[in-house]
Amino acid sequence: MAQSEVRVSGEALHEFTKEVFVRVGMSPEDAETEAAVLIWANLRGVDSHGVLRIPWYLGNVDRGIMNPKPNIKVAKETPVTLVIEADQAFGPVVTVFAMNRVMEKARQVGIGWGFICNHSHQGAMGYYSQMAAKQDMAGIVFVCSPPNMAPYGARAAGTGNNPITIAVPAKRHRVMFLDMATSVVARGKIWLAVDRGVPIPEGWALDKDGNLTTDPSQAAIFLPTSGAKGSGLAIMFECLGSVMIGNPLLEPVLLGKGTEPPPQAKKPEVKGSHPDHVARPIQNSVVIAIDIGTFTDVEAYKEHIDNLIDGIKALPKAEGFSEIFVPGEPEERTFADRSRNGIPLPEGTIRNLRDVAERFSIKLPSGL
Amino acid sequence: MAQSEVRVSGEALHEFTKEVFVRVGMSPEDAETEAAVLIWANLRGVDSHGVLRIPWYLGNVDRGIMNPKPNIKVAKETPVTLVIEADQAFGPVVTVFAMNRVMEKARQVGIGWGFICNHSHQGAMGYYSQMAAKQDMAGIVFVCSPPNMAPYGARAAGTGNNPITIAVPAKRHRVMFLDMATSVVARGKIWLAVDRGVPIPEGWALDKDGNLTTDPSQAAIFLPTSGAKGSGLAIMFECLGSVMIGNPLLEPVLLGKGTEPPPQAKKPEVKGSHPDHVARPIQNSVVIAIDIGTFTDVEAYKEHIDNLIDGIKALPKAEGFSEIFVPGEPEERTFADRSRNGIPLPEGTIRNLRDVAERFSIKLPSGL
């Protein structure tokens, strides 16, 4: 099936999204944050982390897994660190809070290091690392998820496909930032294939029985990028994040102590659901800010990053490449295009959003 | 050519190595540290970071690039951070110093974060992250190198193959730790193929003209692991490390402002040299310690890690795997074997060590 060419403006989609989350009980401020992070992903072409997620989020609110009215608390604090109990808050809501707090600490002592315990889905993590870059800091965030990826050598889920994002500011150029899963692809890329009705390449995922699959609707277990390397990073993130704050996410499932079976053993219950819509979306995160001015001249730093970007882009190109992109650059191009020309949404996503609009009697953005 | 089966005891190789570095001017304490890190690598089967490096190190001392008598200074400090000017010290000497200092800070405020500016080759980085794990902390180290890897989409060197190591303690199990380059393989793996006289797989490296090569003696430029992911991590490490302390390593070479041409443009000068023996080995590092006790109960933490390891190892195995290894585990097995039965060295390495022994009139360990 070809991709739909229906385009919707970012602003209209933002307003719709914000209204949806207000209707499920979020404060207008939190709904604004949630909408901003989702639409930012869509504008950058990372549709896997955009409004495609809304039906899943709503299902999770209905089932009491995602909390639109969380009681967010700082449980522990040192001059440099912070442990935040998120009360199953939406990832964007608590992570924006966390990044602001660790930036305050970084301003004082050079580094701010926060743990977030027990939040729900993070959305597009690059949003948070970029917050730091816009304040003349480097930002790092990594996230720990329940098992959804096969450790290297296994044919069953044993680790999350725990992603990491790193952002730094430039001067002439936009913020440079990396945002990568430790799986071959992020989960949403597989959902997107479901919505588009296309197969996935072999090597992305296993089905629930541990066999390689190219059917995105059967994809239940991710495969790690670079084998032992992606697998190892993901496992170590769990040790640095979840276990460090006494909230392990892998161990309870691995040792069968969990209150629920591993995600792939459950059947979808939500209308319009994707293969792992039912995965328990509780996560922990580590949120780090590094204050550039504490260590070097900020303007010189940004000029160095500009020069680094220019230097990399000017290298001779490998066969099959017409341009060399620095981290985050392809998405910046898409951002520029979609900010002007609107966001194209595939049929499957539009269908799901229509159901959402009906449920709350909200008008869909024009064109949908 | 089959691998040599000559084995030498770790202790004997340690004494020989220590003596070599004393002869080039290191203090006995520093030579002890240098030997400990090199032999630790050999014992773990990471021969690419073991005594194979000695001839290259000596050549670098002769050319004034590696400093056996460095003036190591703390240039900047906050309660959580530290910037160390390494004066081209050997990596092991200054990094052991740095890790001890950041662990002191972590004990006070939860996190210690150090930058090391201007050191020479790091050796086996896992040694330093394990230091933290042995003190009930998590340890993270990443290293920034001059260009030796093609950024994704390029056919020339534009980033270092900047590696990262992360270690955490367990209780019943040994320290669990990751140690990975952002290239498909670490540099030493290619040198080892030279010493063994075997080809390397396609996809590991390019020759100096940017063409894929399977001849390890022609391998001049590494390829990033996972394409954009390995490439992106490496570039961001340079931004978080080198650029943050005002000592960029990529920019001067990329923009042709360097005092020397990119590594692959120079011809080897050192007897018994490897393809990139002449690469300028100056690096910067970031050294981080996280004090577990600041955030959670240390004994509970270690039990969680034990359970995580047990849970992962008990997963159903993928086809072709007889066992699932957690990060660092295969090397721990080798360590146990080689500690008992000695370290096997390939012919090429033995030949080079014989030259070293002759130069300093030191007796080679028996068997070599």
Image: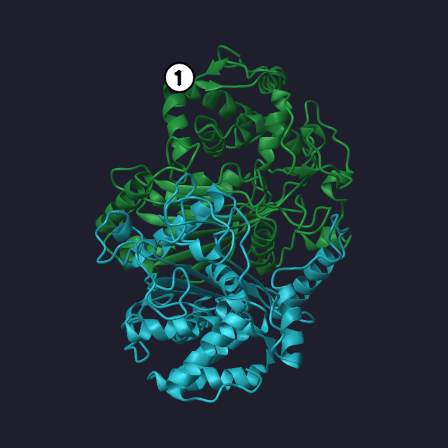
Chain colours: A cyan, B green
- Mark 1, Cα crowd under 10 Å, few <14 / some 14-19 / many 20+, is few
Q: Is residue B40 above or below residue B169?
A: above
Looking at this rendering, what residue extends furthest in the front direction?
A1
Report the quarter where the C terminus of chain A lies: bottom right
Q: Nearer the viewer, residue B338 or A136?
A: B338
Residue type at the position of mark 1 = Asn
Q: Nearer the viewer, residue A202 or B235?
A: A202
Q: Is residue B175 above or below residue B102?
A: above
Relative to B314, B29 lies left or right? right
Instruction: Please state the horizontal and vertical placement of residue B119, each as a whole percent of the image.
Output: 58, 44
Q: Which residue is mark 1?
A: B341
Relative to A290, B219 lies left or right? right
* Subunit that carries the residue with mark 1: B
Q: How many marks?
A: 1
The answer, for residue A94, to whether it is visible in the render is no
Q: Nearer the viewer, residue B91 or A253?
A: A253
